[in-house]
Amino acid sequence: MVIKMDKVSFIIPKGHLAEGALKLLERAGYRILGDDRTYRPSINDPKIELKVLRPQEIPVLVGDGLHDIGITGSDWLRETRANVDVLLDLEYARVKLVLAVPKYWTGINSLSDLLEDFNRRGRVLRVSTEYLNISAEHIMSNPVYRRLYGDREPLMVTPWWKKGENSMVVIYLSFGATEAKPPEDADAIIDVMETGESLERNNLKPIEVVMESTAILIANKRSLMDPEKREKIYDVLTLLRGVVDGRKKLHIFVNVHRDNLPKLLERLPALKKPTVSPLSDENWYSVNTVIDKDQFIEILPILRRLAQGLVVYEPRQVLPLEEITSEENSARGE
């Protein structure tokens, strides 16, 4: 009797993280089919089952074992405090979570200023955000807050419950359109900023960075202990990491005369070691290697002086197989 492995349940995000996730998966070699409205797209790997959910939900669902792996934002992992393993920073959807206030508050340029001003006037400070836990942690870590209110937690308000002891600083749960809340419904917001245009359009200014966030690949801890599921999860990790690393690399090919070969190899950075192949003319060699994109401008003068016939490719993937294998063996306890 053949026992079939359960499929690896992979949640991909809806919303602002969706486009980047789909591009990443497609560049990794996966084909995903389904219209924009489907929550269960198909994928060209029979051992993977996809589902689309909001990134806010993904850390908890993966942490609780309802799904094996997922793509979410590091902001939502911190907010939910889910117990998962972070496998990879996917290095897209790089945003800042910022504290913002109305632009015309020219004297308010930090959380400390804001707390001092509202306390001096005896006013309740109202903050609107989708990030209750992160906001409360950030506010309570401020030295002015600790001086004024000690270790009392700000009052957090949702439609279903309230918690916290300090009613002079109130954090309201926002369900979106957070930038529209000031000044009538909130005095300040803590929200995601990518370019700052949305804040500008709503007459707000950022006064403090709470955290920076990117998309991340996370896994359920128990799933990583299952040998068959771990194998498939590390396949996914290898392909996605190859894309992330490939975006930062260039694959270059050059022809070099044998007299210049030692000088070129001495100056040429490489992922491991350059591949050197003799050409039909015994005085010439072909050299190909993978370098960091940031190094290309630096080494271009060297290539111009010492080599001929430069060809440059941007690799689709660079797969760090040795590193992934080492990490997988560590996960196995080997």
Image (cartoon, rainbow, N blue to C red):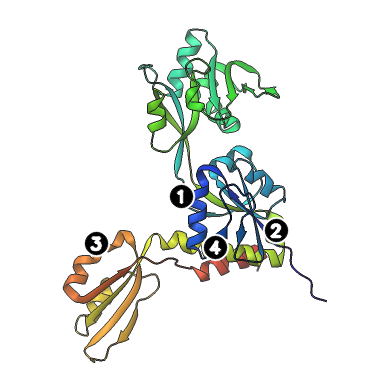
Looking at the image, which residue is at 70% across and 67% down? 228
Picture quarter containing residue 133?
Answer: top right
Residue 31 shows which numbered tag? 4
Looking at the image, which residue is at 63% across and 49% down? 39
* Numbered disc in front, either 3 or 4: 4
Task: Please state, as top left, top right, bottom left or bottom right, where the C terminus lies in the image.
Answer: bottom right
Residue 92 shows which numbered tag? 1
Mark 2 lies on a secondary structure that is helix
Q: Amino acid at mark 4?
A: Arg
Q: Earlier in the sequence, mark 3 or mark 1?
A: 1
Tag 3 and tag 2, C-beta contact below 8 Å = no
Q: CA distance from mark 3 to mark 1?
A: 26 Å
Looking at the image, which residue is at 62% across and 59% down? 42
Q: Earlier in the sequence, mark 4 or mark 1?
A: 4
* Numbered disc in front, either 2 or 1: 1
Q: Amino acid at mark 2?
A: Ser
Q: Which residue is mark 2?
A: 223
